[in-house]
Amino acid sequence: MGKIKSKLIKRTANALLKKGIEFTEDFEKNKKVLGNTMPSKKIRNQIAGFLARVKKQERIYQSKLLKNTQN
């Protein structure tokens, strides 16, 4: 529906990123990485989707920085 995620989803996703777990822009791969460690399928899917979006935003930001430094 929308892109609004609860604090629980954001806080958990950021904690997982800080742990050093490698996530990608692919929702399915993120879902497999999270596996059965999440309390429910819905929460696992929300976290996997949020992480995919965060990784995509990071890639876009990095490419913009690289483009600006080349000019």
Image (tube, grey):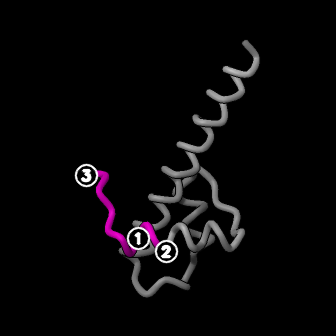
Which residue is depicted at the point 66% across and 29% down?
65
Disc on res. 2: 3
Q: Is residue 7 magenta?
A: yes
Q: Going by the picture, which residue comes out furthest to the top?
A: 71
Tell me whether the residue at label 2 lies in contact with that at label 1, contact meaning CB atoms closer than 8 angstroms: yes
Picture layout, residue 9 above or below residue 49 = below
- Residue 19 image point, x, y percent: 68, 74
In the picture, the quarter occupied by the C terminus is top right
Q: Quadrant of residue 34?
A: bottom right
Task: Find the distance from the CA under tag 2 to the CA under tag 3.
Answer: 19 Å
Question: Considering the numbered disc 1 on the image, is that residue within a helix, a strand or a loop?
Answer: helix
> In the rendered structure, which disc, 2 or 3, sits on the residue that comes first in sequence?
3
Toward the right, the furthest residue is 70
Q: What label sits on residue 9 in the rendered view?
A: 1
Please name the residue shown 49% across and 64% down the image.
Answer: 48
- Furthest toward the left, the residue is 1
Q: Secondary structure at mark 2?
A: helix
Q: How many marks?
A: 3
Q: Helix, strand, or loop for circle 3?
A: loop
**Which quadrant of the figure has residue 45?**
bottom left
Q: Position of residue 40 (x, y in %)?
A: 40, 83
Q: Nearer the viewer, residue 34 or 64?
A: 64
**Measuring 58% from the left and 63% from the top, which residue is drawn there?**
30
For this view, does 62 lie left or right of residue 44?
Answer: right
Residue 15 horizontal/vertical position (percent) = 57, 73
Residue 38, above or below 25: below
Q: Are discs 2 and 3 less than 8 Å apart at CB?
A: no
CA distance for labels 1 and 3: 14 Å
The part of the chain drawn in magenta is: 1-11
Answer above or below: position of 24 versus 32.
above
Q: Nearer the viewer, mark 1 or mark 3?
A: 1
Question: Which disc is residue 12 wearing?
Answer: 2
